[in-house]
Each structure stands twice: as C-alpha cells, then as structure tokens.
Image: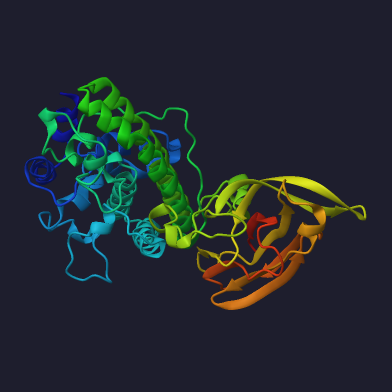
Amino acid sequence: MKRFRRLTKLPLTSLLLVLSLALAPQECPAWGEAHGSITRAAIKVLPAWQQELLGKEGARLADYYCVIPDMAGRDKENARFAMMDSRPGEAYLLILHLPAPQQPENLETLRYFLGKAVGAMKAAKTGDAARYMGTVCHMLEDYGCPAHTVPGDNMFTLLQQFLPPPDRMKGTLLHGPIESGKLDVAIKGYRPRLLGTTADEAAWRLLHRAHEAILNARTTTIPIIQSLYANDTKAVVAGQMKAATMDAKVVADAFYTILCIGTGKFDACERESLHSVGIASFFPLEAVNLYFPQSEFFSSPHWGHAQSGAVKLRVEKDGRMVEKQFAEGISAGIGKSLTYELPASVYQRFTVLAGLYPKRDVDAERAAKSRVAFTINGDGKKLASATLSGDQPAHLFACDITGVARLQLVIGSPVGDAKSNNVYWAEPTLVKKQP
C-alpha cells in the first residue's frame, strides 16, 4: 500500500506510464520495481541542501524518472531524456541496460547523460536535470544488477548448461527470476563521494565505480540461481540486496556529484582529494567485459594475465638498494600492453615506478642478466622509456600527459632469460595540474 500511495501523488499521466511499465513486455528489463527502492535509498543519503534543491522532483525521480529508459518508445513526452544526439530516432538504447564489451562506448554514454543532467541543473531546469539523472541511475542500476552480469548470456541459457536446473525449472529463462522481487533498500550512514568537478572527470570516475558494482553483482548471480533452484526465497533476496545496496551507493555518488557540479558547490577537502588518482585497480581496455580473454595472456615471466595488488620492488635509498612493498601495483607480462582511457584535459602528469624483481627460485646472477624495456605511450606516441636489468633499482617515470586521451604501458621484448624476473608497475598515478 505504501508504494501505491506514493504513486498516487504523481500526475495522472505519470501514474498511467508506471502502470504500463508493469504490464507491458520489455526488451531487456532489470530490477523492475526495485529501481525505485534503490534510487530512493540514494536520494535519502544526499545532504539536506541537495534534497531541498531537488524538491518534489526527488520523489518523481524515485517513483518514475528512474525507469524512463525502460519505457522505450511508449512515453513520447519523456523519451528524449533517454536518447542520444548521436543515435537519432533510437528510443530504446540497449547500452542503458547492458554494458558494451569495450569501455569507451560505456564512458561516452555516461558522459553524455551526466553532462545533460549537469547542463540542465546549471540552467536551473531542475525537472529536466532530474529526468536525465533518472537515465543515469537506471544505467548504473542495470549494470549492477545480478541478471545482467554474464556477457552474451542475458537469459542464462548457456550458464544453465554448467549449472543445470531442477526438473521444475527446466526451460525457465532465469533473467526475470534472478532480479524479481520487492526490495527495501537502505544505505543509512553512507556519505556520497564527489567523483569530479567536471562532467568529463565525473563520468570517467563513475564508470570505474560502476565496474565495482558489476563485479559485486557477479558474486551474487550463481548464489541467487542456486537459491532459486532450492526454492530458498530468503537467500535469493539476500543476494539481490547485496547487489542493490552497492548500486544505491554508486547512484548516490552520481547524484551528489551531478548536483555539486551543477551548482558549483564543492567541499574544499573533497576537491583536494581528487588531485590525484591511482589506477592500478582500474581495468585496462584489454580486459574486455572486465576480464582478460586468453588472447591477452602472456607466457613470460609466467603463464597468466596482468593482475593488480601489492608488489615488491627494489628501490634506491640513501645510496643503497633496498626492497620496498607497494600496496598498489600491477604484475605485468612481457610483450603485452595495458591501455587506459583518460578523461579529456583533466590530468597533467602520470607517475609510475617500473622494475624487475627476481623470482624465488632464480639465482641472482641469472636474474641480473635479464633486461626488459618499459615504455609509456600517449595516444600512440612514445612519452618515455627505460631498459632495466634484474640487478637495477626500479625506475621512476614522470610523464607529461596533457591532452592525452589514451595511456598505454608496454613491456617490450626481453634480453636474456625472460622468466627469471617478475615484471611490475608500482603505484601508477594520474595527477592534475596544480591550481
């Protein structure tokens, strides 16, 4: 009944549209009614001044605007808020529901709608801003939905070959059951994060926040399916709530950032925290669909793919070489590149330590004879390079990346035994120009 009372506060046209959403077939829906609960939870943790700024549009954002992309061509009045100038005539954009395999397309879509929301807010068109915010949050919520986690298998027909259903569920398309249900989402106490001071910066950081939500949702998909097979409704809801709670936090970050940029109001400490960002944990473009396909594996210094985490390198200190542990780094492979899309005109400098670290079972003399070339490219042009041997300290790169849209870290062909040393990039960091 509470849901119905909230809907009756909307204009009759909007109420009819919400009802049509529930009754009409959908191309690729996710979350369904839970969209409103996730969006409402995000709005509730916004600071008071932002909730006051949204006013009645905040309730409409949670009750209807967050599902505008699901209305496809049925809501002629609001369709433009989920359409892109680059795709004229397309009223239903699949990318608002399922991420593209490659990051640039997803980034451009986020940048477009986030920019539209910011522009409307700057023009004091709060209703339009809220509608564009509805499209942004719908995209984020769908990306972080457990029913949208398996690339190319949105109905889980392939996954069911690996995880066969019980007889009573044979032939059932699992997309709907995985996401269906009423969720009471709350993130009380969560403080939204500022993701940027421009639409370009915010969209780029928001995409990487969305990646966190996607990975979180992927951890819930199989447990939810197993719970459906076991007819364990409580466990199904627990899995859905894990994903929905994360989604609400990401959406809260998006709303908070849009309203800060749109009004030009920034906390000084939050703004300062954006001065630099480590990218060791960010997925490079080579990780299609947020995982490394086997074509991106390397055979040296071992069989595998690039991984982020703590790394150990030898560095020079007080005239001598010492070992140092770095919390953020990338274990890389010879002959492979790591490519990162950057926001336009946001960062000025890129710093990273590169070096070799001998494997445990390799003697020092053998490791010392191995040499590897480290190269940093910007938009296809060499920015810096260094060739290091196994007995040298890590090399600190500091490159000017002004105007660079695509940054690439390359490990070149080795000299000597390619398997004697691990190859690391430590603390890769983007830095803004000092104000």
Task: Give the image location of residue 60, x and y in percent.
Answer: 24, 42
Give the colour scheme of this rendering: rainbow
Q: Residue at x 28, y 26 (%)?
A: 237
Judge left or right: residue 109 versus residue 309: left
* In the image: residue 70, left or right of residue 368: left
Percent from the top left, x then y, of residue 409?
59, 66
Give above or below for 115 relative to 383.
Answer: above
| Residue at the farthest bottom position | 381
Q: Position of residue 244 (x, y in %)?
A: 34, 35
Image quadrant containing the C terminus: bottom right
Q: Can you see residue 117?
A: yes
**Residue in front for this viewpoint, 319 or 378:** 319
Q: Residue at x 32, y 44 (%)?
A: 141
Q: Position of residue 46 (x, y in %)?
A: 43, 38
Q: Is residue 90 above or below residue 357?
A: below
Locate the N terminus by quadrant. top left
Residue drawn at (30%, 52%) of the image: 151
Q: Is residue 270 left or right of residue 127?
A: right
Foreground pick, 40 / 48? 40
- Observer-nearest residue: 369 or 22? 369
